[in-house]
Image (cartoon, rainbow, N blue to C red):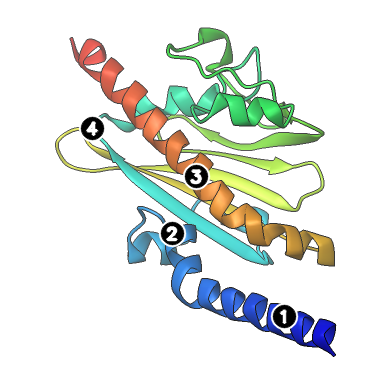
């Protein structure tokens, strides 16, 4: 009887936590930094996975032009590419071999449609590569699309919008996404800030 009571209480607590997360925390986690218009907008890459089970849209303002930001996107990926500008030590615990570069790597500045970027056991295929505008990759299994859009603003500022669209075909995928969502915010926030820092540091030299 006591075990049943404990299990019931535990189940109730888990259920309440899940409800609270979905009601109060999930949307801010999935839309960090993005405006309502950016969240609602159709963006490059959306058509690559139209039947997505979930979407995140995160964004940041960068004091640099789109053409000054795109090079940092084009070279992203595991070594010898430019890393992900986030917590390398966490990425490398997962076996991703990320080493975030602080300079432009000229050899990775011309990605072509169909190029593949290794990401642990997965491979990401370049689907969109439009300098100064957008860059998108899709996983080999077609269940994940990661797209970046650059929107020019006034005074040499740019909105960098990062959108993830994903399909969760299995129950274990859906369960795994529960801790993945807040975890992805920690990593992607650091990434967006890392791109901002690098692009803004280089921008004055580009204008000189």
Left of 88 or right of it: where is 156? left
Disc on res. 186: 3
Pinpoint residue 57: horizontal percent, then vertical percent: 47, 55
Compare marks 3 and 1 and give the one earlier in the sequence: 1
Q: Which residue is drawn at 32% across and 26% down?
A: 197
Most foreground residue, 192 or 136: 192
Q: Is residue 199 above or below residue 154?
A: above
Q: Residues within 10 Å of mark 2 (few under 14, many from 20)?
A: many
Left of 180 or right of it: where is 1? right
Dividing the picture into quarters, in which one does residue 174 lie? bottom right
Q: Helix or strand or loop: what does disc 3 sit on?
A: helix
Separation of residues labelled 4 and 2 (CA atoms): 21 Å
User: Label 1 belongs to which residue?
Assistant: 11
Disc on res. 31: 2
Dividing the picture into quarters, in which one does residue 80 lie? top right
Compare marks 1 and 4 and give the one earlier in the sequence: 1
């Amino acid at each position: 009887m006591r075990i049943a009571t404990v299990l019931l209480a535990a189940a109730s607590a888990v259920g309440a936590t899940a409800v609270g997360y979905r009601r109060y925390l999930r949307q801010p986690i999935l839309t960090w930094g993005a405006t309502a218009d950016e969240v609602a907008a159709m963006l490059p890459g959306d058509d690559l996975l139209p039947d997505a089970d979930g979407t995140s849209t995160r964004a940041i303002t960068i004091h640099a032009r789109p053409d000054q930001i795109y090079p940092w996107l084009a070279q992203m990926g595991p070594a010898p590419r430019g890393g992900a500008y986030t917590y390398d030590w966490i990425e490398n615990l997962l076996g991703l071999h990320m080493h975030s570069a602080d300079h432009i790597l000229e050899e990775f500045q011309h990605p072509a449609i169909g190029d593949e970027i290794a990401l642990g056991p997965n491979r990401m295929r370049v689907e969109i590569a439009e300098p100064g505008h957008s860059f998108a990759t899709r996983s080999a299994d077609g269940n994940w699309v990661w797209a970046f859009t650059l929107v020019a603003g006034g005074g040499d500022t740019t909105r960098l919008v990062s959108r993830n669209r994903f399909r969760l075909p299995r129950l274990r995928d859906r369960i795994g996404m529960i801790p993945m969502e807040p975890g992805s915010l920690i990593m992607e926030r650091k990434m967006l800030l890392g791109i901002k820092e690098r692009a803004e540091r280089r921008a004055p030299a580009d204008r000189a």
